[in-house]
Amino acid sequence: MLNKNFTYLPALKTLGNDLNAIFKAVHLSSFKSLILPADLFDWLDMQKNNNSSWSQFDLNNANFKILSVLDIIPEHFAAEVPMQNKTIIRNFINNFDSLLDQLVRLKINSCSLNLNLENAFKIHEKEIAAVELLKKISPYLIRKNISMLLPVRIPSVFSVDFEKYSFFHRNIMNPNMKLSIEIHPHEFRIKQNPLEVLKPFKYKIGMFSFIYEPEAGNYLVDKLLTPWLDALQELSYNGIIVFAPLTAKPEVFSRELTKLTDLIQQS
C-alpha cells in the first residue's frame, strides 16, 4: 500500500501534438494538479489562433491546476550557458526573467532548470560557473516568489557522489532553489537501499518523481514504490510525489492516469 501521508500527481516530460487530448484526460481523472514541460508556453501561443485545434480546451475552466513547469529553458541550451560569455549569459537571464513573468501570469509558482549538473561536476570550472549563474538568477526568483528545482537523476549516469549535490546546494544559498529527485526505478542493476541513497539530499528535496517508460513495458507497482516512500518519510520529506510516464501519446497517458489512480486508491 502506498503511503497516505503524501500527495500524488502526474507529470508529462514531453508533449506531443495533441495537448488538448492530454488536458481532457486529466480533466476527466481524479487528479487535481499536473506538471508540464515548457512546451506549455508554445501551446498558449497557439491558442491565440482561433483556427488552431489546440484551442478547443479552455484551460481557464479546467478542474485541475498546473503546479509546475519542467525545463523552463531547454536542457541542451541551459547546460551550456554557464561557460559562455557575458553577453550570452545576460541574454539568458533576460529570457529567463520573461519566462518567470509568464509563470506569474499563469499563477504557477514553480519551475525546473536542468543545467546537467552531473556532467558539470566532472569539470571544476563548469561547476563553479553553474553556481555563479544560479546566484545571478536568484534575485529574480525571490522577487517573483517562484521556486526553482534542479534535477538530480538517480541512478546517476556518471556515478556521481551525491554528496556533491548537497555541497553544491549549500553554495547557492537560495531558499527558493531545491533539488528535484528523479528516480528511474527500472534502471537499477543491483538492489538499492533507498534510505542510504537519499540521505545526502535530506531537507534539500523540493520534488520527488518516479520516471518510467510504459511503452517499453515498465510500470509502477506498490512493491517498487514503497521502499522509496518509506525512506522519504523517515527523512521527514513532506512534499509531493510525482508519477512521470515517458510518453507523448494521449491514449497512453490517459491509460496511465487510470492505473495510477487505481494504485493510489488501493492504499
Image (cartoon, grey):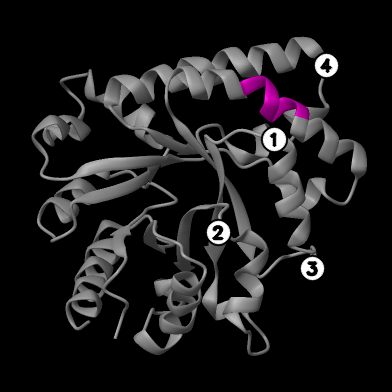
- Stretch of the chain drawn in magenta: 132-137
> Which mark is first along the chain, 4 or 3?
4
Q: Mark on residue 55?
A: none
**Which residue is denoted by mark 1 in the rendering?**
172
Q: Is residue 87 magenta?
A: no
The residue most toward the right is: 124
Tell me how far mark 2 sits from mark 3, CA to CA: 15 Å
Q: CA distance from mark 3 to mark 1?
A: 23 Å
Question: Where residue 85 is drawn, which disc sits there?
Answer: 4
Compared with residue 216, is residue 166 higher up or lower down, i.e. above or below?
Answer: above
Gap in angstroms between the C-alphas marked 2 and 4: 30 Å
145 horizontally vs 165: left or right: left
Pointer 1 with pointer 2, Cβ within 8 A: no
| Residue at figure coordinates x 62%, y 84% from the top left | 193
State the image coordinates of residue 114 (x, y, percent, origin top left). 61, 42
**Vertical relation: 164 (above or below) 227:** above
* Cα distance in 3D space between marks 1 and 2: 17 Å
SS for tag 4? loop
Q: Secondary structure at mark 3?
A: loop
Q: Residue at x 79, y 64 (%)?
A: 161
Residue in the foreground of this view, choosing between 244 and 229: 229
Q: Which mark is residue 181?
A: 2
Residue 159, label in figure: 3
Q: Is residue 63 above or below residue 138?
A: below
Q: Secondary structure at mark 1?
A: helix
Which marked residue is nearer to the observer: mark 3 or mark 4? 3
CA distance separating discs 4 and 1: 21 Å
Q: Residues within 10 Å of mark 2 (few under 14, many from 20)?
A: many
- The residues tagged by marks 3 and 4 sit, at their Cα atoms, a distance apart of 30 Å
Mark 2: amino acid: Ile
